[in-house]
């Protein structure tokens, strides 16, 4: 049923956020300020587990809410997603790939973040296009939260890769905005009942 699929979708999205949160706790306790911290670390496992869980949850939510989506717009969604992925690859992934250093495992871990972020942002843009660029409250909050998370992550990656962005704590509030949007999305009524 749609309810069961949507429930599973939200559980997957919740599990993704839980993995991210556990990684943040581990990072704060054991990595931040520790010059001898390993890389990759258990925090990276949590951060990277976020992506497949969030992708699966987003895909299941699209499937559960298919009645809200005009499937004639699938080509718009595909074009928007591929365009976003192309821009992300050209501007973010290539930059990080040029500046990534270390062992093969370290470089692969470093490159996994922008790749995961680009795919997430492409999926979000594709879903908005599928809704005819009128996503409604739930989709807007969910996709804004995921997009904010991705933007903060990309900014952090660029900040830590050869100082491409100014340092400081200015990225942290973006993560908080992401958390508020994602938490609010769960409590929205279905579009049909609005």
Image: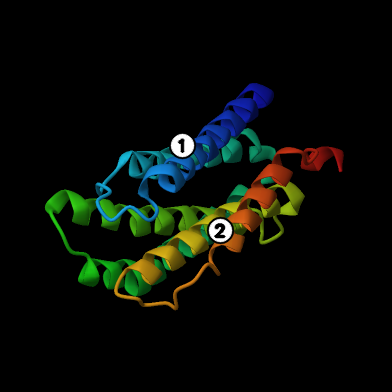
On the image, which quarter does residue 144 sit in? bottom right
On the image, which quarter does residue 52 sit in? top left
Residue 159 percent across, percent down from the top left: 39, 70
- Considering every residue shown, the one lying at the far left of the view is 103
Residue that appears at 29% across and 68% down:
96
Q: State which quarter of the image contains the C terminus.
A: top right
The residue that disc 2 covers is 147
* Mark 2: few/some/many CA within 10 Å (<14, 14-19, 20+): many
- 81 and 26: which one is in front? 26
Residue 101 percent across, percent down from the top left: 18, 64
Q: Secondary structure at mark 1?
A: helix
Relative height, residue 106 to residue 85 (above, below)? above
Q: Secondary structure at mark 2?
A: helix
Q: State which quarter of the image contains the N terminus.
A: top right
Residue 88 percent across, percent down from the top left: 39, 67
Residue 61 percent across, percent down from the top left: 60, 37
The residue that disc 1 covers is 53
């Amino acid at each position: 049923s749609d309810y069961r699929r949507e429930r599973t979708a939200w559980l997957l999205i919740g599990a993704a956020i839980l993995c991210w949160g556990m990684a943040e706790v581990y990072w704060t306790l054991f990595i931040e300020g520790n010059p001898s911290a390993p890389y990759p670390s258990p925090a990276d496992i949590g951060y990277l587990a976020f992506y497949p869980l969030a992708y699966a949850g987003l895909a299941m939510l699209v499937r559960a809410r298919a009645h809200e989506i005009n499937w004639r717009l699938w080509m718009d969604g595909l074009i928007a997603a591929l365009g976003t992925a192309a821009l992300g690859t050209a501007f973010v992934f290539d930059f990080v790939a040029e500046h990534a250093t270390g062992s093969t495992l370290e470089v692969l871990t470093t490159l996994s973040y922008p790749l995961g972020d680009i795919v997430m942002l492409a999926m979000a843009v594709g879903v908005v296009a599928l809704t005819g660029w009128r996503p409604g409250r739930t989709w807007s909050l969910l996709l804004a939260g995921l997009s904010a998370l991705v933007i903060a992550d990309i900014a952090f990656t660029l900040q830590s890769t050869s100082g491409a962005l100014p340092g400081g704590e200015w990225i942290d509030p973006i993560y908080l905005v992401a958390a508020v949007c994602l938490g609010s999305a769960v409590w929205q009524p279905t579009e049909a009942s609005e």
